[in-house]
Amino acid sequence: MKKVIYLLLITVAFCAQVNAQGYNYMGKHILFNANVTVSPSWINPNPMTPHLTTLSAKAQRYLGINYWVIPSIEAIVWEKGSVGAGYNFYKSPFKGKLAVPVINPYNDYYYYDYRDFTGMITAHGFNVFYKQYVGHTFAPLGHYFKFNFDGLFYNYSEIVPSVAPEGKDMLFGFKVEYGYDFLVLDRLRLSVGASIGTTFNDFSLAFKQMTDDNYSTDYTISDYANSRMWMAYWFGIKLGVGFLAF
């Protein structure tokens, strides 16, 4: 995490330096943002799962959500654009099935059976982005396209039945967001948007989980963690609030 913090500090310092004599809105060009991105989790356990256990399976399917918490700092660099950097946080249970060798006590041969498990994944990371405002508007308000690169560092472990070792991994991802920003009292910025993207890993397991409940193959707990990250990342609805500070 120290490397992530250093990278964010360097990016912020660069943004501030580039923009020191550049474009601004009413004399101000730095914004601090607090964003949340949500999406339906459908087939996956999620942070809402413990609170939905009394509801029907159909209700759990459609009320469960993924969420990302994404604070960031942003600098207006020209009339139609801004750049920024931020921090990513994501936490959720996930599920899968693991191959387990079963030994025949009579002939010492073994075969593989499959058992279900539930794990927990916690991700931290960074993002850097560029926002291009479009139409008859200018930064930091109006319609925009946002191009986002993310670095995600996460830990995972099995919690039921808790026999698999813990692990950690990293992913990178890219997404494009379309949204709208508007200002209140020339200081407070409210944002809504929708994004679509992908992590740079093999996400074929995600499609198998979504389309075939009876698949059986030799995937590891790490593969399921990667799959869960992709399913939470590829689509999102963003709600945000920002403050035009200075």
Image (cartoon, grey):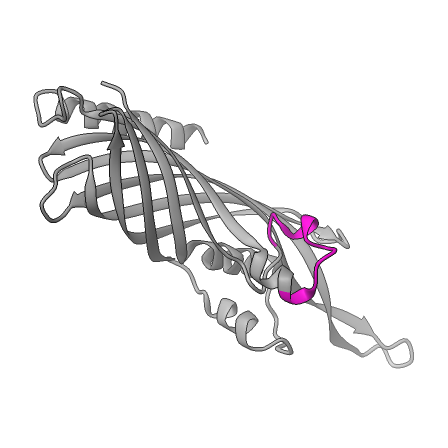
Query: Residue 228 or 49: which is nearer the viewer?
Result: 49
Question: Which residues lie in the magenta part?
Answer: 46-58
Query: Residue 30 or 240: which is nearer the viewer?
Result: 240
Q: Judge whether residue 71 is colored magenta.
A: no
Residue located 59% across and 60% down the image: 44
Residue 188, by quadrant, is top left
Viewport quadrant of the C terminus: top left
Q: Specify the principal SS of the magenta part.
A: loop
Return the x and y of residue 138 as percentages of the image width and height. Answer: 12, 38
Residue 36, by quadrant, is top left
Q: Is residue 223 left or right of residue 106?
A: left
Task: Check the image and name the residue furthest to the right.
Answer: 106
Q: Judge whether residue 49 is colored magenta.
A: yes
Residue located 20% across and 37% down the image: 141
Q: Is residue 23 left or right of residue 91?
A: left
Residue located 45% across and 65% down the image: 203
Above-or-below relation of 196 to 91: below
Task: Check the image and name the residue furthest to the bottom.
Answer: 107
Return the x and y of residue 195 as percentages of the image width and height. Answer: 33, 54
Above-or-below relation of 233 to 24: below
Above-or-below relation of 89 to 104: above
Return the x and y of residue 58 as percentages of the image width and height. Answer: 63, 67
Query: Residue 59 or 77: which is nearer the viewer?
Result: 59
